[in-house]
Every structure is written in structure tokens, then in C-alpha cells.
């Protein structure tokens, strides 16, 4: 939920990166962290298992700049992608302002993408949100791999409502900031509507 | 999208004053108020190099996780959580949709922190109720006249 503090002149919004296990949600955050000036971001907190799989969430605050004298700060979260962490995913969606769905472009992950997207819709609903109304971006990740589904076919299968579709290679940063920009822009546009 | 929380300057200072008193009464190092979604609302005390943004997010995650466990065993929620370390400890109390987080060391005790936190909980809950139910028509939204160019400029 957006929080506007008129005393400290700050606006805080919450963005959640969602998607199946190993699709690159944490890699998106890691790239943003690595390529942002330290004064513009906080620590990257990763609650991960010993094998670096996300256990609860990753979190990173990012300051984008000033709008009309208000510092605009986005709190970026990822969810754990593995199917059995569903209870945690629901909790992290609480108070969300915008969602990025990170799809894994590999052919063998198509079913996992569909299942995760269905899970996102269900979990948003359980928190009182509607995917069709919330700021939302679809990222097609891992476009550098060999066994990938053509972008048009992936979009045809996964696109829900004409949301921006961004091809990405999160490990090299391709499309990472475009994705963030697309979702942040929608969040700010929603706030403008009041 | 849910309605944003708007905090006026005066309300912010009122909350800070309550937190300052609690900090003194509880002999705590830092006291802060966090929304259940993990947004820090105000803090008071020896913040120094403490990363309060991350602490706020983790406190909310902590309460959310234990709240999930509570639901599984048929409880509504666990209203307080305490983590005691060798030197530093944290006490979290759930106050409606807020979390009151107190960081303290050997200069205080868990009993004192619990007592003092409970004493201000009602006041904070009432203040926040007023914040969320008040009319904000007089406040200029920072977004009212924002243009696409303004938004784009954040990313340039």
C-alpha cells in the first residue's frame, strides 16, 4: 500500500516480483542492486536457503528521485517461487502496489509459468486484489538461452490484459530496468488517478 | 490498488512524540512504528547506522509469518513477539494494522518494554484510526498535476 508522508516528504510504494522457481526474480533484484548508486538504494536482504533458493523473500528499497518535492521510493520484493512456499507468497502480496511476473522462456518451463500465473491470480484475490486492475508487467526472461519459446507464443499464452511485455536477460541486465520502469510508471499513474 | 496512507506533518510529529516518550519510559535504544505491510511510519532513538527500512520490512515479514502459523493452529494472531539476543533484543507488538517495534539492550528488560508498549498501544491505535479515516481533500496530492514527462524523468 502506498504511504505518503507529508512531514518527511516521501512516497513509498511496494512492487512484487512473482514467477515460477528459478525464473530469475532474485537475479532481477540483484542486477538492480549492483547497478544502482549506493546512495539511491538500501541493502539487498535475501532470506534464502543454504543453496541460495529464496526461502521467504528478497527485499530492496530503491529511491528513484523526486516528484514535486516528494522523494519517490520503491520497495522491491520477490516471492519464493517453489510451489510449496505458497503460504509465504500470499503474505508478501499484502499491500502490493504493482506486480512483475517473471516468466521463464525455456520450453520445459511453460507449464510452470502457467501454474505460477494462475497461483498469482488466486493469491491476489485472497488479498482482495484483482490482477486485471493492478499495475502489472510481464517479463519474458532468459531470452539468451537456446531452447526458448518464441516471444509471441509466450505472450499469447501468458499475457492477461494488454500489459507491457518485456524481453529480458536478467543475468546481463537486458530488460531489467525497462521492466521496473514499466511497472513503476503504472503505479505512479494509478496514484495520479487518485 | 488500495487507498494510500497519507500522513500529515502534525500527525507525524504527534506519533514521534509518543514514540519518544515510550523510548524514555522503556529505557529503549530505538522505537519505531511500522505498517503491517512493512512500511516504516516513524522512528525515534539511537538510529545511527541502523537500517530501519530493512528492519521494518523484516519485522513485518516476521509478524506475517508467525500470524500465518497462528492461523494454522486456530489462533487469530500472536499479539507480541520477542527476540532476545546476547546484548540486543527486539520486542514487537501488533497494534491493529501497525507494529510497534522496540529495540533495547541490558539497560532495560523485556518486562518493562512489554509493560510500556502496552500502555501506549491504545493511544497509537486511536491516532492511526484518525489518520486513516480523516478527510484529506485539503492536501495537495503530489501526483495531482504530474505529467508523463515527470514520471519519465525519474528514470533518466
Image (cartoon, grey):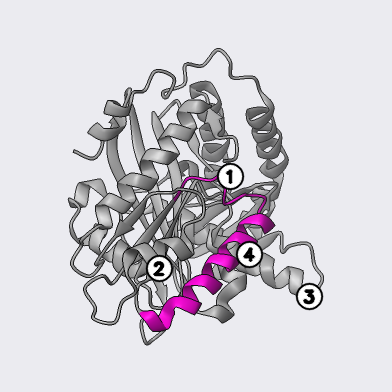
Q: Are marks 1 and 2 in contact (CB under 8 Å)?
A: no
| Residue A189 vertical placement versus B68 (above, below) | above
**Which tag is nearer the camera, tag 4 or tag 1?**
4
Q: Is residue B69 left or right of residue B92?
A: right
The residue indicated by pointer 4 is B81
Q: Main secondary structure of the magenta part?
A: helix
Q: Residue furthest right?
A: B74
Q: Is residue A7 left or right of residue B73?
A: left
Whether residue A81 can be seen here: no
**Badge 3 and badge 2 in a common chain:** no
The residue indicated by pointer 3 is B73
Mark 3, secondary structure of its residue: loop
Mark 4, secondary structure of its residue: strand
- At horizontal 51% and vertical 29% (from top left) the residue drawn is B12
Q: Is residue A182 left or right of residue A170?
A: right
Which stretch did the figure color magenta? A107-136
Mark 1, secondary structure of its residue: helix
Amino acid at each position: 500500500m502506498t504511504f505518503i508522508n507529508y512531514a518527511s516528504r516521501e512516497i513509498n510504494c511496494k512492487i512484487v516480483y512473482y514467477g515460477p522457481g528459478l525464473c530469475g526474480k532474485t537475479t532481477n533484484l540483484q542486477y538492480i542492486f549492483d547497478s544502482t548508486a549506493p546512495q539511491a538504494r538500501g541493502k539487498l536482504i535475501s532470506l534464502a536457503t543454504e543453496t541460495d533458493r529464496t526461502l521467504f523473500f528478497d527485499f530492496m528499497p530503491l529511491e528513484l528521485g523526486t516528484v514535486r518535492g516528494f522523494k519517490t521510493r520503491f520497495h522491491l520484493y520477490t516471492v519464493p517461487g517453489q510451489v510449496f512456499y505458497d503460504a509465504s507468497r500470499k503474505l508478501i502480496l499484502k499491500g502490493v502496489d504493482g506486480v512483475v511476473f517473471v516468466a521463464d522462456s525455456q520450453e520445459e518451463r511453460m507449464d510452470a509459468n502457467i501454474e505460477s500465473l494462475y497461483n498469482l491470480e488466486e493469491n491476489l484475490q485472497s488479498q482482495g486484489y484483482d490482477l486485471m486492475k493492478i499495475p502489472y508487467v510481464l517479463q519474458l526472461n532468459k531470452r539468451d538461452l537456446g531452447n526458448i519459446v518464441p516471444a509471441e507464443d509466450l505472450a499469447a499464452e501468458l499475457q492477461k490484459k494488454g500489459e507491457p511485455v518485456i524481453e529480458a536477460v536478467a543475468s546481463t541486465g537486458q530488460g531489467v530496468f525497462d521492466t521496473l520502469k514499466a511497472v513503476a510508471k503504472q503505479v505512479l499513474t494509478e496514484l495520479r488517478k487518485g | 490498488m488500495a487507498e494510500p496512507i497519507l500522513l500529515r506533518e502534525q500527525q507525524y510529529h504527534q506519533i514521534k512524540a509518543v514514540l519518544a516518550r515510550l523510548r524514555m519510559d522503556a529505557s529503549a535504544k530505538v522505537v519505531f512504528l511500522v505498517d503491517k505491510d512493512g512500511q516504516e511510519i516513524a522512528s525515534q532513538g539511537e538510529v545511527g547506522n541502523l537500517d530501519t527500512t530493512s528492519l521494518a520490512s523484516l519485522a513485518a515479514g516476521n509478524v506475517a509469518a508467525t500470524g500465518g502459523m497462528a492461523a494454522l493452529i486456530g489462533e487469530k494472531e500472536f499479539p507480541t513477539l520477542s527476540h532476545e539476543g546476547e546484548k540486543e533484543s527486539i520486542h514487537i507488538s501488533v497494534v491493529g494494522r501497525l507494529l510497534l517495534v522496540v529495540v533495547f539492550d541490558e539497560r532495560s528488560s523485556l518486562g518493562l518494554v512489554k509493560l510500556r508498549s502496552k500502555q501506549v498501544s491504545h493511544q497509537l491505535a486511536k491516532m492511526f484510526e484518525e489518520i486513516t479515516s480523516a478527510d484529506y481533500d485539503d492536501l495537495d496530492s503530489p501526483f495531482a498535476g504530474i505529467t508523463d514527462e515527470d514520471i519519465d524523468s525519474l528514470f533518466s
